[in-house]
Image (spheres, rainbow, N blue to C red):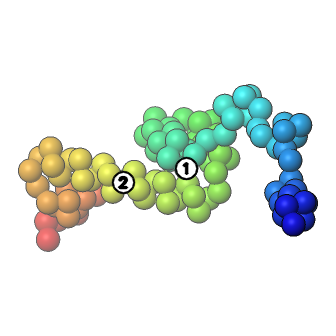
Amino acid sequence: MIDIIGSLRKAVIPDRKGDRSAAPSKEDRRKQHNLFEAAATFVSASVEEDQARIDEASGWVSPEALSFGVSELACRAVIALARERGESPQTVARTLLGLPAD
């Protein structure tokens, strides 16, 4: 019975001790970027009008992920400014966009 369980375990969970190619190399890990890194680089490059960095950051993640990251960055920035200014997030967002107070 123990041999059957051991054989099943090996069939279901393969031994990967010798399989180092499945893990990304240190160089590959350095090249990988998450959506927040991409968003931060994209937004700061946009402010600085650095098209090369905009293009680079745009290639790090999918367009959907980049959009989500930029949206998350905007939310966090508005919250931080609202706390700093003692204003509501809506007031800060409208002011940043040049919209009249609601």
Q: Say which quadrant the C terminus sits in.
A: bottom left
Residue 40, x across and y down, in percent: 47, 42
Number of marks in picture: 2
Mark 1 or 2: the one toward you: 1
Q: Is residue 42 visible?
A: no
x 84%, y 44%: residue: 16
Residue placed furthest toward the front:
1
Of the numbered discs in the image, which one, if any, rests on residue 74? 2
Q: Quadrant of the N terminus?
A: bottom right
Q: CA distance from mark 1 to mark 2?
A: 14 Å
**Label at residue 35:** 1
Say which quarter of the image contains residue 19.
top right
Residue in the image at 24% along x and 53% along y? 79
Provide residue 43's location: percent of width, then percent of height: 46, 44
Q: Horizontal placement of 18 versus 51: left or right?
A: right
Instruction: Classify mark 1: residues with Cα within 10 Å, few (<14), some (14-19) or many (20+).
Output: many
The amino acid on which the numbered mark 1 sits, given as a three-letter code, is: Leu
Q: Work out whether 51 lies above or below 76.
A: above
Give left or right: position of 16 versus 94.
right
